[in-house]
Amino acid sequence: MSMLKIVVLAGGSGTRLWPLSRSAYPKQFISLYDDQTMIQSTVDRVRPLDFDSLTVVCNAQHRFLVAEQLRAMDQTASIILEPVGRDTAPAIALAALEAVAVGKDPLLLVLPADHVIKKNNIFADTINASVPLAESGKLVTYGIKPDFPSTDYGYIKLDSQCGVGYNVEKFIEKPSPDRAGAFFESGDYLWNSGMFLFKASGYLQALEKYRPDMYKSCVAAFKLAAPDLDFLRISEQEFGRCVAESVDYAIMEHTKDAVTVPLSAGWSDVGTWYSLWKASDKDLSGNVTRGDVVLQSVKNSHVIADDKLVAVLGVEDLVVVNSADALLVAHKRSLHELKHLVKHLEEENRDEVKVHRKVFRPWGYYEQVDSGSGYQVKRITVLSGAKLSLQKHKYRAEHWVIVRGTAVVTRGDETFELHENESTFIPKNIVHSLENAEKDDLQLIEVQSGDYLGEDDIVRLNDIYGRR
């Protein structure tokens, strides 16, 4: 049996799940369905499989989120950093090139990082049963038997039987309601899940055959890849020349080796609030809730309360999502317009589209507590053994108050410890840093004051995480 390499694609933005999913912290890093984040659930799902290694392909700005969430579950992985998003075909090519670069030719099990699968045992059995097809040179995709005529998914039309799967007659993009209904009634179509199994070399050969331009760009970008701490950073100049295209368009619609294997494991791509509501457990009135929620005379609604009580009265078919800095109230039938709302917010340069009040950094995270003219207040948590960069600010001064733990502070030429209820002041243009050398998390309050308080007012002189 060929070696198995897991490839997790974690480059999506998840704008249709705003306000929980945001560009700097998209849905794959959030707990939406259960206690684990989406990427953690994906990794946990493959653990029963006999795999040799795991690779995550992600956006460079999310690298520390990936590393921290894998570390939290004690999972090792290689992490490939895309300098720009180019859809799934180039991302898979990078993972395939990584595999063959060390003289191996494993089977690649390609999984998006943001799917829900309720029956992990059936998932594992289906993967194992389809291995002979992939070993024989087939490009295997997994199809989901529709349980309603969805217009949100692409479809696969089945042809003749092939082992545990079917040869693919054709792929169909998201259909109109009438066509979706006809597909559902016929029984000859499966939803396209976006999960694949094939040999690394077979994928690269197919890419070179059907999209030689993309293949050339990916090879050139990978040749110039450079290690960056625990990451592999892909050349931006070369990868930026690559065309953005899905693996379906680039290869699967053209190859005669496409085979689809039916998967009945409680799958959902949770790409929208509606699909997440549909995949979630509901109360007797069809409601899904999370957080401090009180409902009265409410039906078939999805209500999330992140930081305060949310009470909903006398409505049905609503989605109500309350986060620390944004509130979404939408009727289910209008959810298809959410991406246009998010685009409007992006055009207005609203921070609520990009980041949460809780912002993660490689050393921990901070939460914005208050802000006003000339000041802002943050609550900062520094993980054990972590260290903020040696830096200075041109426009702001900072006052640090230790709430819990002990901080090792560098301020100019001084290095000293600060304990609970102790504080220090960092004037403008003074070089400074902070380290948590203790075994528990360090918490402090930071009060910034100055004419400009943007996050880009940082001049880093030294950073253990390789940031510039």
Image (cartoon, rainbow, N blue to C red):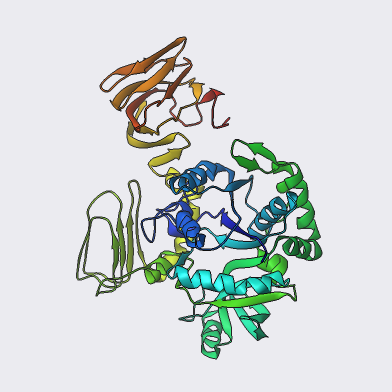
Residue lying at the far left of the rendered structure: 296
412 above or below 464? above
Residue 372 visible to an observer of this rendering:
no
**Residue at position x 44%, y 30% in the image:** 386
**In front of the other: 335 or 59:** 59
Q: Is residue 455 left or right of residue 207?
A: left
Residue lying at the far top of the rendered structure: 413
70 above or below 263? above
Q: Quadrant of residue 237?
A: top right
Q: Is residue 45 left or right of residue 371?
A: right
**Residue at position x 38%, y 14% in the image:** 416
Residue 170 visible to an observer of this rendering:
yes
- The quadrant of the rendering that contains the N terminus is bottom right
Q: Is residue 104 left or right of residue 336?
A: right
Residue 417: % across, % down: 36, 17
**Residue at position x 71%, y 65% in the image:** 250
Q: Is residue 309 left or right of residue 45?
A: left
Residue 24: % across, % down: 49, 45
**In front of the other: 443 or 202:** 202
- The quadrant of the rendering that contains the C terminus is top right
Residue 45: % across, % down: 48, 62
Q: How many marks?
A: 0
Q: Quadrant of residue 49?
A: bottom right
Residue lying at the far bottom of the rendered structure: 186
Residue 52: % across, % down: 61, 56
